[in-house]
Amino acid sequence: MTTKTPPTRFQLRAKRLDFMRHVLLAPGHTRNGNGNGNGHGAAALTEASIVLDVSPPVFAAVWAALLLVRVAATVYLVALAALYRFIARPELSYYAGLLGPRAPAQLQPMALALAALATAHLYKIVSMLWHSALARRLVFDAPLVDAAAASRSSPPPEPPQEPQRQQEAAPSAAALSLAVASRVWRRCFGRRGFFGVESAYFQLRFTARESFEIISQTLQLQTASHLIARHWLNDVYVSIVLVNCWSTPVVQHLCRRQLAASNRRLLASSSVTTATTDSRGPSASQQASMAAMEAGVQRILALERMLCLAIDLGLDLATAMVLPAILVLPYVPLFDVASLNFPSELLYNDVWFVNMVYEFQQVLAVTAFESVFTFFPHWSIYSCCGSLRALIRERRPSDPYRLSNGSSSPAPSHVVLPAATAQEKSSRESDSHSMWSRRMELRTFLRNMTISNAVHFAFFLWGLGMVTLHLLALRNSTAHDTTGCKQTLRPWLTQQSACSVYEFSCHRANKSSIQSSDLAHLDGPSLAVLVISHCAALRMPDEWLRFDHLLGLELYNSTITEWSKDVAISSLKHQRMYYLLLIRVNMSHLPDGIVTPLPANLMDIEIAITNLTTLPDNLDTVWHPLSVFYVEDAALESVPPCLTRLWVDELSLSGNNIKSLTSIQVYKSSVLIGRIWINNLYVALLVINCWSTPIIEFVFHKRPELERLLCIAIDIILDAGTSMILPFIIFYPYYANFDFVSYNFQLAYLYDDVWFANMVLENQLSAKLVRRGERMLKLLQVVFFAWGIAVLSLHLRAALKSSSISVPACKQPTRPWLASNYSCSVVRFNCHRYNVSSVTDAHLEIIEDLSVIALVFMHCPELRVPRHIQSFHNLLGIDIFNSTIVQWDESAAITNATHPILAYIIFVRVNMTALPDGVLNQLPDTATDFEITVSNLTTLPSDLHERWHPMSIFYFEHSPATEFPATLYYLQADDLSLIGTRIERLPEFESGHGFFTLAMTHTPLRELPASIGNLATIGFLNLGYTQLTRFPAWMETVSRTATKVYVHNTPFCASLSEEERARSYGPDAVLTCSEDGDRVDGKYPLAVMAKQRIY
């Protein structure tokens, strides 16, 4: 009998590394002294190793708790997604705007993301209930099949014969793909995969997720210090961050102390086993002792991971569900679903309003950046539930022997081991070759543990920092005078007084006006509402410009002495400002500080109880459209003309001295309506409204019941005529001509100057009659009667004036009252008909300036655009047809100041070697349609994109241009047409560039660029009648996402067979060789418009 050589120190260390690898990295099976797996180890390979076996009652409690968590998460996510969708409704645009200027764009995507996560939770809930019902006991998922046990219970298969092995068929491609996918899934999401609970990277992955959570919670805490006024909620946020920073290091420190003691016992047992084992391996008692100690190590690891995940889950539930619910739920019973609004007494309560806005900003994501940090805790809840499910297992008496737990049935007293075979000896020799790789794995595990420890130490310091900042903020909040502050906050890193609602009372301060020094002590980012009250001579200080987070400004019971443009409301400094209130303010006119371009978010302006007598005439050009505009209990005697042009969703003029709004409606009809008979009918209804009541009361004054009946009946008839019948007569023809398939009118209508002007103007007219007041005073009856005479006189005067003058260039006359010149909405000046070479100022001065809507110059051999066009402030568009432009300088330029509502500029058959200076200034914001068709223009100015804003429509058709204009590379245009040019190549567009339609029909285009910008925005490509033979790689994507790509009459289509063309490129295909005759020769309908431009 040969004597076995004792293991060397190097071999002993290798065996210890091998043992540590199986305990810490994959403790699923053990190896005997020779390095071979025993029978129990093979069985354990198919089972979970790092698990916590618990008794059935404990397992049932955990199962129910996780089910309740998923149910609660599902309900909360569905409710939150519904809240996002609810606020995204157009009727609630007021509240969406309160969240921030970029908030409306985030509402729908967040709703979809939250709904998707709720669906995932619901699937897991159904899976738990379904598999528990099938198994007739509580389980989380489908039970795993123990492969080893199955192999032990089934008879061993007979070895296949050699001929049979040769006849076996190769696996199919689908089976191989499925096997590869399954393997990749296990490598990534299996228990020992990268994202599994037994992964060697679990600590590193958990630390990274915890780092992201702490950053997210810290940002929430910092935001809450600025937004949340309920100080106990700030304390809770600080506590959550502190527990998150300190809990994991404490848990891991306690667990790893026990783990280190267990490792020392295991290593000692491994050394003894190595020293005492003979060639037949360790004894049964040694093997059982090692298995028990290994199971203890696994229980410690499982317990550590369960505690970390459970604490993480609890903190996520608190920050993502509990605290937001505490913030939002108090507002739910206060909201009136019928009116889609909160009660007025709450909305006008400064403190309540600021709390409502700020607390909803805390709960809802208002930017794309916040969306990520808002969604992450909800995803973390879903992930933690899955990881906890994988770490817990019910201990059942009927379970087979598991080496991976200490609660298994006892091992036999002795085990008879077979003699070592030649294969086992070869395995022992191969252990020395794999020793280096095992050492590398152990080093990776220990390095990840070291990184985790370092990060957790940083967490500990981070938690101390958060507590320190919170205590400093608490100290600062008590160190300042809070007089005038209605709502205090506790923001970090500020030495000034943090107040969200501040009221300065001049009466309390014994001053006549507020000074800059009175606001210098306030923290700028904290102030949300500033109230200035009881000031006898208010001069607005420049210090208020510092408050860039201001939501609202209120002036109450004060006399405004000075509010200059130097301290005006600024669109740059007050980007978040949403409302302005002027209550009981003494001012005969609006101060200059208000008559200025407003911040885009400012949608609510309310003026009440004031001596204001009028509004600036240019208010509609200075202010953008508003949601709410109130001028109540003021001294207005008539509706200011600017209000007929200013777009307001909710307008209130109650409490003023305005006699009737019907006159305003009739006046608007005289300006907007080109159909004379409708104007006559409006005037008739108004005259009847003014005269009917005095006549009825004079005739039937002895029969009051009949008098009142007739007054009410006539009132109903007149109201129905002005608010229903006449608007229907105006609107119905446009409804009948609208194509609901293409969501557009026919081109022949859109390019018809008269029809287009009528469509725009007539649909601006709204019918609104005030209720008939008490008619008891005789004086009021006389006023009504006189008012009717005045309206009738003005109407007759306008009718006589329009018929006494003949203007051949006018194609659509109107009859506005008090107009000094001939009124015309559509002017089509034909130089050939007037027998002149150009239009002049004298030709245009006879026309009322504000009545001109559309202006056409045509057939002018030497067109010099007159400077008088700058007086046409209501011009919608200018069209030059079949003319040679000799001069159009800046004195007649199109600008935002002179033409604030201009929408289009069109050049057709125009002789010009360069774009005239008159269109090279900064165009009006509303100008989004620029068309050039059939010209000798060869290029565009290289800096056009710096002068103009992005366009919706830009046509540069039928010109001799041979190169793609470089400026169009930067000038964004949704609909770009270069039809009929001589361009052979297009430049490569960057990913940020995008357009909806690109038309290159009838060009010598030979190839498309390798990149064409944002493919998702492309809807139509018109590439017919070009020289294209092939397409770049991006065409495959566009042919799936776009609406239509036309490539008819190209070499590419010519190379296809009839069968292939019909099968793959037919009329129904996106990439089609079939021709669509609509606008193939040009986006501008030249054939239609040439007939209209003859006269």
Image (tube, rainbow, N blue to C red):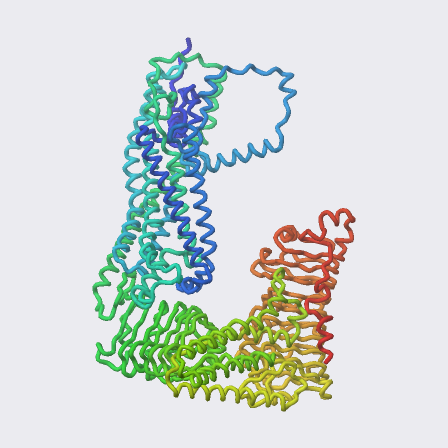
The answer to whether residue 614 shows anywhere in this view is no
The spot of residue 486 in percent (x, y) is 26, 67
Residue 157: quadrant of the picture? top right
From this view, report whether residue 175 is shown above or below residue 819.
above
Look at the image and tell me whether residue 61 can be seen: yes
Question: Which residue is found at the position 67% from the left and 77% from the top?
Answer: 914
Residue 1052 position (above or below residue 181): below
Which residue is located at x 67 percent, y 53 percent?
1070
Query: Considering depth in this image, is 950 or 18 the residue closer to the camera?
Result: 950
Q: Nearer the viewer, residue 730 or 152?
A: 730
Question: Against 62, is 751 above or below?
Answer: below
Q: Position of residue 88 (x, y in %)?
A: 45, 59
Which corner quadrant of the image does residue 370 belong to? bottom left
Is residue 484 placed above or below 1 in the rendered structure?
below
- Residue 1084 image offset from top left, x and y in percent: 68, 69
The quarter in which the C terminus is drawn is bottom right
User: Is residue 173 rendered to the left or right of residue 211?
Assistant: right
Q: Is residue 991 left or right of residue 219?
A: right
Tell me the residue at 55%/14% (across/down): 158
Q: Position of residue 353 (x, y in %)?
A: 33, 64
Q: Residue furthest front?
A: 702
